Amino acid sequence: MEINHFFPDQRIPFFRNIDKVLAQLLEGEKYQNFQNNQMFLEKLNERINKLDISLITAHGQYNAVIDLVRFDKPKKLIELSDTNKFKNNFIFSFSCNTADRLGEKMIEDGAITFIGFYHGFSPNFNIDGLRGRQFKLEMELFGKKIFVYAFIRVFSHFIKKPVTAQEFYEMLLLSILKVLDKVKESDVDDILSKFQVPINRKEYLRHKKLIFQSLSDIFIKAFDSIDILGEVNYIPWKNLSALNSEKLEEILISYEMEFEDNKFYEYLVKYRAATILGKKSEADEYLEKLKVENIERKVITEEYLEF
């Protein structure tokens, strides 16, 4: 399983250094980031039948991931004609509006799960009641950085721990609000060090209560524009060995993919769970089902069967 991260624009302030932080948090995982869209798409094409994870952090619109070029039309970097390259992937798209047509098309073309924003992310972060344009911009960036800070930690937890896409989705808001509470109790120097945001101390302290109440409401609203398409029960297959016996037994009994096209993934997860539990007859049963599914899909290799 590889984690392929498309991060084309280092100029987006609230995403700054996200690739470096993820590389640290995902140490030991097969994580790679791409700035060039063609190199990213070529990588996906090379691994089109692999069960990988794709992360996109970029500008977006309903039918494309885009680059905003000043005084020019947005340049499409990933568009509807590229969605077949995400086959068999779990995708998180931290890009405005991409859960609309783009995410839907990825699922139609064989992606297992897509999580992303139906609406714009950036416009939600204006805090009413603050004075001065510069301070408002500082607090807008501050809020976005807290949101992204929490997101990348939940995302890395999802990669390393066997939780489902639905659990990841539910953990995200809880984590964001917990981080917000911790930041609220921090002093200004700690905030400056951690988030690298210029803050007018006097205005910050004067409006602190308003800022954090507003950010809590803003985060909930931003979270409400995130949706899951495809399989909510997707779970990173590689890390099942971290589960206890009770959880593995639960997977054998109740784990089920909703769509027939994804049954091969269900059988893979159950095969691995049965193998870890030492249930050879059940493991053999799911291995045979995998082989039947694999005749058409050509997905399963020794990588998925070894521990």
Image (cartoon, helix red, strand yellow):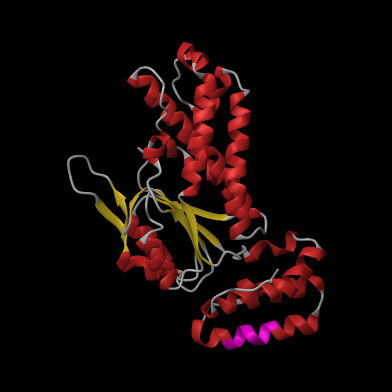
The quadrant of the picture occupied by the C terminus is bottom right
Residue 79 sits in which quadrant? Answer: bottom left
Q: Which residue is found at the position 63% from the left and 60% from the top?
A: 164
Q: In the image, is 130 to the left or to the right of 79?
A: right
Indicate the quadrant where residue 99 lies.
bottom left
* Residue 72, horizontal then vertical, whole percent: 17, 45
Which residue lies at the image location 44% right of the left edge and 69% below the top edge? 107
* Main SS category, magenta section: helix
- Percent across and percent down for residue 85 are 40, 69
Viewer-nearest residue: 170 or 48:
170
Q: Which residues are magenta?
A: 286-292
Q: Is residue 140 above or below residue 30?
A: above
Is 140 inside the magenta-drawn segment? no
For the point 45% across and 49% down, the residue is 225
Do we see residue 55 in this rendering?
no
Say left or right for 97 vs 214: left
Q: Quadrant of residue 269?
A: bottom right
Question: Residue 87, percent across and down?
Answer: 45, 71
